[in-house]
Image (cartoon, grey):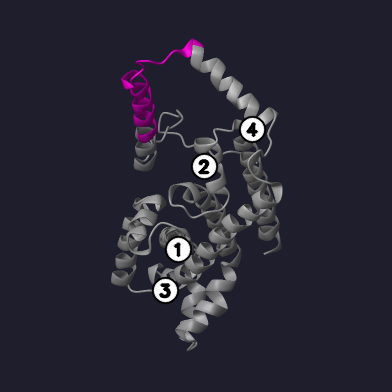
Amino acid sequence: MTALVERNKNGCIKVSKPCRGQRVLKGLLFGSAIFTVIGFFIMDYAGLDLTHAIPMTLDNLGQMFLSPSLNNTTWSNALWQVTITLSLAFLSTILGAVISLFLAFGTAVNLSKPWVSNTIKAFITVVRAVPTVLWVLIFAIAAGLGSVAAVIGMIFHSIAYLVKAYSEAFEEVDEGKIEALRASGASYFHILFQVIVPQTKSFLISWTFLRFEINFGVAVAMGAAAGAGGIGYELFMASTFYYDMQEVGAITLIILVVAIILELFANKLKVNA
């Protein structure tokens, strides 16, 4: 395969100028590097003794990952708490995915009117800009701290995430097929569920399972921050109440194993989709 090289009138190779997107990306990377360097200089290092902090950190890491053990709970209870966390993540993902699917139909520019698409996009952009933990705390005002507020907050943020992912997948469908079906008299719902959804099925499954993995991590955090229970609450108790580094390490390894299993299952599911 030969490469095509564009040359100017003098026979020299013509180098194209970077486009606007490339300049913006370079600017963001440069700005991030500058702020990172500045952050190290403006941090308050008063009272920090590195000669004492580094050995203590290494000792804690050694206790966590070289000799993990459950001293204040049992393995059966830990596995049950993992199941609770997975259930919270699964519930919020499934409900969020169903609602997101129908909202995505109105968000995709090739399936909806521009004003409807722009309205939904503006709404989900605002929702997505607020972290999940803040939505959980907002809903906790009405529902109280616990699993209910955690699930509602995760559903809310999952909808904003999945609507964008689903709608972009719908917009990649060949416009010619949609126009051909419209010309043949096919109904709107026939186009959606006979053409759009089947052609984007693998993308929908991938994005949904990716959000499920994210919600699992969020559910772990909400177990501690919002009292939602699950393995996150056990991790919170081991780290702050018992200060048991061995138990923290054991729970962390359990969470890591579950995350790896979810990743392997997601890859297999995507291949078979």
Q: What percent of the width, then of the height, locates residue 199?
A: 58, 69
Q: Amino acid at mark 2?
A: Phe
Left or right of 206, for residue 128? left
**Mark 4 or mark 2: which comes first in sequence?**
2
Q: CA distance from mark 1 to mark 4?
A: 31 Å
Give the numbered dot on residue 56. none
Please say whether residue 46 is one of the residues in the magenta stretch.
Answer: yes
Q: Are marks 3 and 1 in contact (CB under 8 Å)?
A: no
How far apart in space, not on screen, are marks 4 and 2 (Cα)? 13 Å
In whole angstroms, how far apart are the C-alphas of marks 2 and 1? 19 Å
Part of the protein shown in magenta: 28-51
Residue in view at x 59 percent, y 63 percent: 205
Identify the residue at horizontal 45%, vertical 29% (top origin).
11
Is 168 one of the magenta-colored residues?
Answer: no
Three-letter residue code for mark 1: Val
First in sequence, mark 4 or 3: give its number.
3
What residue did someone put label 3 on?
A: 111
- 1 or 4: tag closer to the N-terminus: 1
Q: CA distance from mark 3 to mark 2?
A: 46 Å
Question: On the image, numbered disc 2 is attached to which residue?
Answer: 236
**SS at mark 2?**
helix
Quarter of image, res 42: top left
Residue 246's disc is 4
Mark 3 residue type: Leu
Label located before the other in sequence (2 or 1)? 1
Closer to viewer: mark 4 or mark 3: 4
Front residue (pair 256, 74): 74
Give the Cα distance between marks 4 and 3: 54 Å
Question: Which numbered mark, 3 or 1, is in the foreground of this view?
Answer: 1
Kindly report the secondary structure that dominates the magenta region of the rendered protein. Answer: helix
Crowding at label 1, few (<14), some or many (≥20) Cα neighbours within 10 Å? some
Residue 148: which numbered mark, if any? 1
